[in-house]
């Protein structure tokens, strides 16, 4: 199961889809070579809005391009359904370390929020 972390408030939520054009039963989103993909709708836009209405781009490690200046990103990790907060925080930390190695800590904080 994929989980996204809001860069603004830190809220962590499983990624799911209930239909982009035709409504369907809620299903878990998967990572494919095309990015976040719903098994019923196909590839989804890489936009994430947390329950508190903070909108940002999804950052899918190994799929998304390197984050760009001026945009905010919600990091995505893959974990077991019902994973603990500690497990998810560890996964998000690993994602941000990999990005930070390439662009620097200050840029990571600007893109993904304070940690």
Image: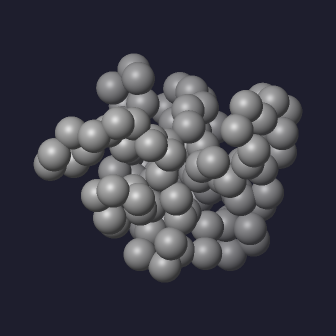
Q: What residue lies at 41% left-to-right and 23% top-to-bottom?
A: 51
Q: Position of residue 18 (x, y in %)?
A: 32, 38
Residue 7 in sight here: no
For this rendering, which residue is in front, 97 or 76? 76
Q: Position of residue 38 (x, y in %)?
A: 39, 56
Give the left or right position of residue 51, taking residue 98 as reference: left
Give the left or right position of residue 92, taking residue 108 as reference: right
Q: What residue lies at 56% left-to-right and 43% top-to-bottom?
A: 4
Colour setting = one colour
Q: What residue lies at 33% left-to-right and 66% top-to-bottom?
A: 43
The single residue placed furthest to the top in the displayed view is: 52
Residue 36 in sight here: yes
Q: Position of residue 1 (x, y in %)?
A: 63, 48
The single residue placed furthest to the left in the displayed view is: 21
Q: Position of residue 3 (x, y in %)?
A: 60, 43
Give the left or right position of residue 83, taking residue 64 as reference: right
């Amino acid at each position: 199961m994929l989980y996204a972390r809001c860069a603004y408030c830190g809220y962590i939520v499983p990624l799911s889809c209930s239909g982009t054009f035709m409504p369907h039963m809620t299903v878990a989103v998967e990572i494919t070579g095309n990015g976040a993909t719903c098994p019923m709708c196909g590839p989804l836009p890489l936009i994430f809005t947390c329950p508190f209405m903070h909108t940002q781009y999804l950052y899918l490690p190994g799929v998304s391009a390197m984050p760009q200046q001026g945009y905010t990103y919600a990091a995505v990790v893959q974990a077991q359904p019902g994973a603990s907060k500690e497990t998810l925080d560890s996964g998000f930390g690993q994602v941000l370390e990999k990005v930070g190695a390439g662009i620097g800590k200050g840029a990571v904080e600007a893109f993904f929020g304070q940690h």
